[in-house]
Image: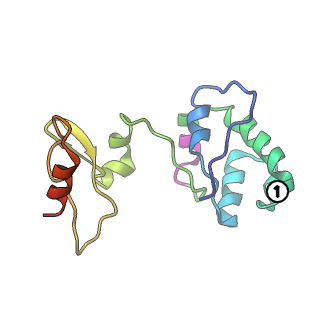
Amino acid sequence: MAPAIEPPSGTRPRSSFSQICSSFHRPIEPQFFADLCEQLGVDPSLGSPQRDKARCPALRAELGRILRSRTRDEWTASIEGSDACFAPVLTLSESPSHPRNAARNAFVEIEGVRHPTPAPRFSRSPSAIQGPSARQSSPVAQVLERWMR
């Protein structure tokens, strides 16, 4: 994935536009970028070739115009599941219940506190959260000692 697309300067975003642009990434591979441009309805003359730096300002403006036209949820319903390398930007409260995260058991609850599970997961060296969140901060030396056991 290429760097995030920044919202055009001087624009007041529609609901969720800032969320979309803050971590909406462009696919690096040309075929996925082409699919994203097609899904979004980008003017074909701007999306190809994708690495033409002279076209970047116009492409950025076009993406800003397009992305402001719908909410995050509308874009998600339209694009998710395609080959466009797209994923919605979720809030912390939304993440655990997202179908992809739920299917991967990406979150676990310990003593009433939801935690992301360790990643990556390896078959020969499984990892797990080793206990509940600390009730108070610990001196660094104690933390390092626990890690070294």
Q: State the residue in front, 144 or 26.
A: 144
Placement of the C terminus among the 4 image quadrants = bottom left
User: Where is residue 137 shown, x and y percent of the image?
Assistant: 20, 38
Name the residue tied to disc 1.
Answer: 53
User: Where is residue 86 shown, x and y percent of the image?
Assistant: 56, 51
Main SS of the magenta part reads helix
Answer with left or right where residue 23 lies relative to residue 92: right
Residue 18 shows up from this direction: yes
Q: How many marks?
A: 1
Residue 45 shows up from this direction: no
State the residue at coordinates (33%, 42%).
96
Secondary element under disc 1, as helix, strand or loop, is helix
**Mark 1 nearby-residue class (10 Å; few <14, some 14–19, many ≥20):** few
Q: State the residue in front, 25 or 104.
A: 25
User: Where is residue 99 shown, x and y percent of the image?
Assistant: 37, 47
Q: State the residue in front, 123 or 80.
A: 123
State the residue at coordinates (35%, 49%).
101
Please, what is the three-letter code of the amino acid marked with disc 1? Lys
Placement of the N terminus among the 4 image quadrants = bottom right
The answer to whether residue 69 is magenta is: no
The answer to whether residue 77 is magenta is: yes
- Residue 122 drawn above or below residue 119: below
User: Where is residue 39 shown, x and y percent of the image?
Assistant: 67, 49
- Residue 141 drawn above or below residue 13: below
State the residue at coordinates (51%, 43%).
88
Q: Which span of residues is magenta-colored?
A: 75-81
